[in-house]
Amino acid sequence: MSSYATHVSYTVTSKNAMHLISKHYKHILNRDNKFEIDDECGNTMLIMLAIIARDKNMYKILNKFIESEENLDAQNNIGDTALIHAVYYSNTTSSIKTVKLLIKYGANLNIKSNNGSTALMYASCNSGKTSSIETVKLLIDSGANLDLASNAGNTALMHAAYFSNTTSNIETVKLLIDSGANLDIQNNNGDTALINAAYYSNTTSSIETVKLLINSGANLNIMTNTGDTALMCSACNSRKTSSIETVKLLIDSGADLNMKNKNGMTALASACKNSNTTSSIETVKLLIDSGADLDIQNNEGETALAIACKHSNTTSSIETVKLLIDSGANLDIKTSEGLTALAFACRNSKTTSSIETVKLLIDSGANLDIQNKDGNTALGFSCDASNTTSSLETVKLLIDSGANMDIQNKDGDTALELASKCSNTTSSIETVKLLIYSGVNINLQKNYNGNTSLIYSVYNSNKKSSIETVKLLIAHGADLDAQGKSKYTALMYAATSLNNTSSFETVKLLIDAGANLDIQDNLGRTVLMHASGNSNTTSSLEAVKLLIDSGANLDIQDDQGWTALMFASYNLKSTSNIETVKLLVDSGANLNIKNNNNNICLTYLVRYSNSLDFIKTIISKNVNINHLTKINGCKKKYEDTHGNSLLHWCAIGIKENTSNISILNFLETLDIDKTLKNAAGKTYLDYLSLTTT
């Protein structure tokens, strides 16, 4: 709520005033108004005298002093005048007699202090304390403007109504109304006198004030800047600053039950959301019994039931949920995100909602299998969050109640997949176990990429999931060789994610369980190819060795004719390492297999290995040194006789800083045609000259 004129400046007190008056008494008696008083807050002698003029002697002095005062309306540093101070203190250190005197001599009734408050506002706000209703009446009768607003937009009526049970009183409110004050002016927040009175009818204001304003014709349905009405404010705070009696009064007087604020919230929705804190279940019942629409949706598409379910363990309550259900609330209305009351309750059953709420909704007939816009069901939400905001008990309750375990969301995830891939974080292995024992389809594949629960668990076995989850899935019949996205198997995902989300132990587990080592993906590549080509990044030398020792075929070729050895050799420039190449060679990989571009492993080694000793070792194994390879990028498919020799590729490697001159010098000693020109018409020396110039 906006600020009010509860007090004038505390920069001056009656004690200070007396001190300054005593100090300048001679000037005052001589009616000498030209002197300056020593007051750092800018108070004039007239202000000082007005503050303490209840004293007869001070009043006499004021009476004499005022006759020669040239500026009755001088303001101190915060904009207060002598009249404002006299009005404010008219029932304590000053007097109504002083106010009359200042008005008689022409004091401006409507001057505003720095916060925009007038004398009438101060008097109205404090008429039951430091000021008086007689002062208010005097100001009104003298022509004070009733509807001036402060900087916060508050009028005298708003001040009086807001504080009618504390510093003001209902008589002041009635006086202002009877005198013609506008009932429906809105302050900067859009509050009216009625809204404020209703909001605070159990604290600073009163229900009698609310009744008076209503009976006087105040508009019941004016909305604040946030779209709230008096009924919304009262209903939301009926157990705190307002009261259920105020809510009933507003309803009985014709307040619209179903108006929405800017967030789309009705009085019922607000009361339901806060029925365990600032509002009450009695308020909810009153609104329902009075005909409030149970199924109105807010801007997010949430009904009162959805809101109550979402907060049934915090600001709302299960009793509120039951009341709404018993009153006929629709259980299955979807929000704009496609969420139902059950989805909210399940997703938050361990935090803001509760399993009791979930059970109540299920027992009341809520549809268990409604999907949100992403295709997730209540079971999916619970499984995904069973270790955080939801619980294993919620998952069990849904399953026991008949929830479909195999529904897929828009990403193709089932409840099992959601639980499996997060079994070490937001979900749990117990959730996975429960789903398996309950008969979930363990090998159901995603509808768009074919991934299974095992694939997800394997891929995340060192991060969001766990190796225990992988073991559990395998033990219960998970298909080890199911091919998912890009026809990758679980073993491929594991072997190529070692330094990220999976682990070497997972690879070993899959192999020991009998995973097929030689299945090819959509490009014809095997797990050994993937591991060999990435042994320095996402895979490892240990994984390559394990695959070889376990019997992986070393010489399978992919769709482009590449072998594991070729991938390892080619990727020496980036993701592989020389130890992997040595391991494959020592394990018996065929050195002379050609790919579709006629390359053999030696082609890549002379270009990328940068190791003369290793080149010598390879050549000593009777590898073909005189084959020619095709040149990538040529418009025409040249015969092998128009390709690059090993000398060409070594020279190119020197240019790329991936080979060295000692390797070239060694190759020059071999029986390789040094005059050969490739399809571009260049000999190897042409590339070497490009390198050295």
Image: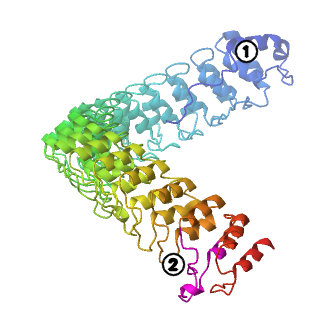
Q: CA distance from mark 1 to mark 2?
A: 104 Å
Give residue 268's quadrant in the image: top left
Q: Quadrant of residue 665?
A: bottom right
- Residue 523 position (above or below residue 123): below
Q: Position of residue 407 (x, y in %)?
A: 22, 55
Q: Where are the magenta residues, as a range?
A: 622-649
Q: Position of residue 254 (x, y in %)?
A: 28, 44
Does the magenta run of residues contain 279?
A: no
Label 1 Cα crowd, 10 Å radius (few <14 / some 14-19 / many 20+): many
- At label 2, which amino acid type do we have? Asn
Q: Residue 560: horizontal and vertical position, in percent?
A: 45, 74
- Mark 2 burial class by Cα count in 10 Å: few <14, some 14-19, many 20+: some
Identify the residue under disc 2: 597
Pick whichever of labels 1 and 2 is earlier in the sequence.
1
**Residue 590 as seen in the image, left or right of residue 296:** right
Residue depicted at x 31% and y 64%: 448
Position in image of residue 446 (x %, y %): 29, 60
- The secondary element bearing badge 2 is classed as loop
Identify the residue under disc 1.
17
Name the element at disc 1. Answer: helix
Report the residue at 71% width, 13% height from top. 58
- Is residue 323 shown to the viewer in this render? no
